[in-house]
Amino acid sequence: MAILEVKNINKSFGRNHVLRGIDFTLEKGEVLSIIGSSGSGKTTLLRCLNSLEFADEGQIIVSGETIFDAAVNKRPSESELRLKRLHFGLVFQNFNLFPQYSVLDNVTLASRLLNKGTKEEIEQYALELIESVGLKDKVNSYPCELSGGQQQRVAIARALAMKPEILCFDEPTSALDPELTGEVLKVIKSLADKHMTMIVVTHEMAFAHDVSDRVIFMDGGVIAEQGTPRILENPSSDRLKSFLTSF
């Protein structure tokens, strides 16, 4: 059974119909890359999955549990929302670290607030994650003392600290220069090698080709084409062909 089932997701902002009947599944251990032009609905889709936005229609099912059903016309409470969001980890474009906290505190904060273990257990796991993203020597540093690539790696460790079933990335390298992009993509590839289930919204076509199990191309709020990364070599739609020529 798929770890994630997304069924007929529709989302509008006023008259702007951003998502138009999005359907896909994701298997445990798969890496799914979502590509497409700005405004195609990629980020809105991630935000709906993470309960940061609510779709107007459709269902989201994780490990057989329906975590969202637009037909159930009831706004979840804050405690219910927190539980739903635990299924997913989300790494944003612009890091979103807390500037007043050290690297260690940024990574441990959510786990401590949600009582995910003893202080010692939480810190030990955080230290392991920080070391795994290559920042063992930055544990006590603050975000202002880190490069963009280092901040994004802290953000990845922070997302992993909650042990999500599915890790989502929203253009994780868009705010980085090419040198720093490589160090972040290396961390994401290492997670793929460990069979972490991931959804990656990206404009890095080489990464999508080399690391993904499947690729979705979104255009105008719909899935215009999807398949293995070979669709990037041999696209069947004119729209995907046109999109790829811009790189």
Image: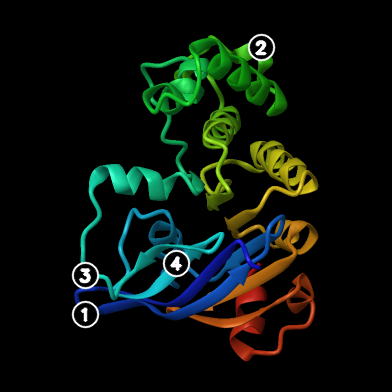
Give amino acid for label 1: Arg
Which label sits in the foreground, 4 or 1? 4
Crowding near pointer 3: few (<14 within 10 Å), some, many (20+)?
A: few
Give amino acid for label 4: Ile
In percent of width and height, residue 13 lies at 24, 71
**Quick one: 37 or 128, which is closer to the camera?**
128
In percent of width and height, residue 74 lies at 21, 63
Crowding near pointer 4: few (<14 within 10 Å), some, many (20+)?
A: many
Return the disc, 2 or 4, that comes first in the chain's sequence: 4
Q: Mark 3 points at which residue?
A: 73
Give me the C-alpha separation between circle 4 and circle 1: 23 Å
Q: Quick one: which residue is furthest to the front in this view? A: 64
Marker disc for residue 15: 1
Badge 3 vs badge 2, beta-carbon distance below 8 Å: no
Give amino acid for label 2: Asp
Badge 2 vs badge 4, beta-carbon distance below 8 Å: no
- Residue 220 visible in the snapshot: no
Q: Mark 4 points at which residue?
A: 60
Quadrant where the C terminus sits is bottom right
Marker disc for residue 137: 2
| Horizontal side of residue 215 vs 6, given as left or right | right
In percent of width and height, residue 80 lies at 31, 48
> Which residue shows up at 38% across the image and 25% down it?
98
As drawn, 2 above or below 161: below
Q: What element carries label 4?
A: strand
- Residue 187 visible in the snapshot: yes
Badge 3 vs badge 1, beta-carbon distance below 8 Å: no
Marker disc for residue 140: none
